[in-house]
Each structure stands twice: as structure tokens, then as C-alpha cells.
Amino acid sequence: MELNKRDFRTIIFYNFKRGLSTQECHGEMESVFGTECPTLRTIQNWFREFRFGRQTLDDEDRDGRPATAVTPENVETVRQLIEE
């Protein structure tokens, strides 16, 4: 089973609440997940967010281009353009 970002963030939050240091958290996660484990820097960033009161594990909305532009409407529009 592969874990996604939110799964790893949940584990990081759990370790944060346990009072582990970032290095201890990274060490435990690395021993279990190996190369799939988030980097120490990522864990440090999330610990900082939790210390400042962050309440969610989801990515925050950002300005700019969406991660994906594939929608049924876009597919249909392109299909029509190709057929023309």
C-alpha cells in the first residue's frame, strides 16, 4: 500500500503531538518507510506549521495555474476543435 502526502502528514502530526523532535520523527519514519519517507526538511516545515497553530493537513489553495486542467468540458472542447 502506498501512502499519500496526507497520510505522511498525519504521521508527522502524531509524532509532533508525541513531543518528538524533527530528527526523531524523521528517524522513525525512515526506518519504517525507507526512501518513501518525507525529507527531514519537509518534516521540519510541518513541525513549524503545527507550532504556529495550523489545523489542517491539506494543501492550502495557491494562486497560479491549477495543478491540472483536464476537465470533461476541456476534453470535449478540444475534441470539437480537432473534429472541425
Image (cartoon, helix red, strand yellow):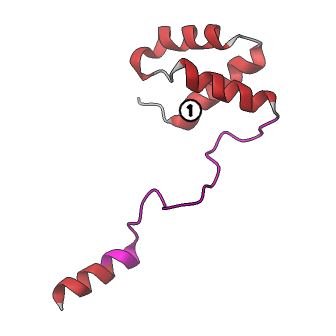
Q: Residue furthest left?
A: 83
Question: Local crowd at mark 1 within 10 Å, few (<14), some, or many (≥20)?
Answer: few
Q: Residue furthest bottom?
A: 84
- Choose between 65 and 24: the one closer to the eye: 65
Amino acid type, callout 1: Asp
At 70% from the left and 24% from the top, the residue drawn is: 47
Tell whether 52 sits left or right of 77: right
At 24% from the left and 86% from the top, the residue drawn is: 81
Residue 32, image x and y in percent?
48, 12
At 63% from the left and 44% from the top, the residue drawn is: 58
Q: Is residue 39 above or below residue 7?
A: above
Q: How many labels sit on residues?
A: 1
Q: Residue furthest front?
A: 64
At 70% from the left and 10% from the top, the residue drawn is: 21
- Choose between 47 and 79: the one closer to the eye: 47
Tell whether 30 sits left or right of 14: left
Per the rendered image, the range of residues in magenta is 53-75
- Which quarter of the image is occupied by the C terminus? bottom left
In the rendered structure, does residue 74 fall within the stretch colored magenta?
A: yes
Element carrying mark 1: helix
Residue 35, image x and y in percent?
40, 18
Q: Which residue is mark 1?
A: 7
Q: Quadrant of residue 44?
A: top right
- Choose between 78 and 64: the one closer to the eye: 64
Tell whether 1 sits left or right of 29: left
Main SS of the magenta part reads: loop
Q: Is residue 16 above or below residue 70?
A: above
